[in-house]
Image (cartoon, coloured by chain):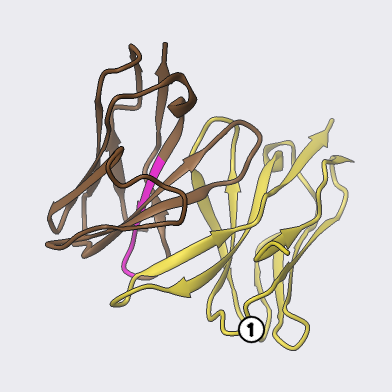
Chain colours: A brown, B yellow
Amino acid sequence: GAVVSQHPSWVICKSGTSVKIECRSLDFQATTMFWYRQFPKQSLMLMATSNEGSKATYEQGVEKDKFLINHASLTLSTLTVTSAHPEDSSFYICSAGPYEQYFGPGTRLTVT
Amino acid sequence: RKEVEQDPGPFNVPEGATVAFNCTYSNSASQSFFWYRQDCRKEPKLLMSVYSSGNEDGRFTAQLNRASQYISLLIRDSKLSDSATYLCVVNSFSSGSARQLTFGSGTQLTVLP
């Protein structure tokens, strides 16, 4: 299957700082990538659809000014959590794929 | 009503047992269906796609009933390594050819020795 990587795998940051998460497709080009968030014991919730060369599409209730998405190339999308707060602590996962969606290994963010 | 609903679980079964998971979806225009498994603190991994004719992959059998908007997964001769959360996943199309997925809340399976 297709390979998607994410970096970092985990990060701890202080409240008020910003954190950037990278999602890369390693063996295919992805015009679209998806960003999800998963809280403990809950399912994945789609946050936004990242479109190469254009603005991301955000799901209802997701603040676009807080979760900045940049999809500057066909193999890289970044999610920046700006002014992070403890309630932003979660497991962030990206996905991409030519047909089935393959997931990156996820980034566990802890905001203290 | 949730777009994708699954058995709440958890399921605790002995090794060798057969276990079945059910799932219903609300969007009749959905085109593609999948089962993913997710291990604790890991990303979801594709287990199998689900086709209208039903499909089997070793000990795993998936069924789709479009009329009832119902999907199932059957695991035979369950192994300890099958312990995970199983996610029923349905697609809705986004722009281009990429698929936007909607996830069920997952059913937790624990296979006991």
Image-based side of A64 in relation to B60, left or right: left
Task: Classify residue A58 by image quadrant.
Answer: bottom left
**SS at mark 1?**
loop
**Up/down of B52 relative to B15, above or below:** below
Total numbered labels placed on residues in the image: 1
Q: Is the residue A83 above or below the residue A104 in the image?
A: above
Residue identifier under label 1: B28
Give how far across and how far down residue B68 sits, in percent.
78, 83
Q: Residues within 10 Å of mark 1 (few under 14, many from 20)?
A: few
User: Foreground: A57 or B60?
Assistant: A57
Q: Quadrant of the C terminus of chain A?
A: top left
B31 to the left or right of A13: right
Position of B36 compared to B111: left or right?
Answer: left
Q: Position of residue A57 (x, y in %)?
A: 31, 60
Residue drawn where x is 56% and y is 79% of the image:
B30
Q: A69 and B9: which one is in front?
A: A69
Rendered-image quadrant of the N terminus of chain A: bottom left
Residue A83 appears in which quarter of the rendering? top left
Image: magenta residue range: A93-98
Q: Is residue B89 above or below residue B56?
A: above
Magenta stretch contains residue A97: yes
Query: What residue is shown at x 73% (from left), y 61% (from top)?
Result: B5
Q: Horizontal placement of B98 versus A76: left or right?
A: right
Residue A62, magenta (yes or no): no
Seen at 68% across and 74% down, the residue is B26
Chain containing mark 1: B
x and y percentages locating residue B15 in the rendered image:
84, 40
Q: Position of residue A89 (x, y in %)?
A: 46, 25
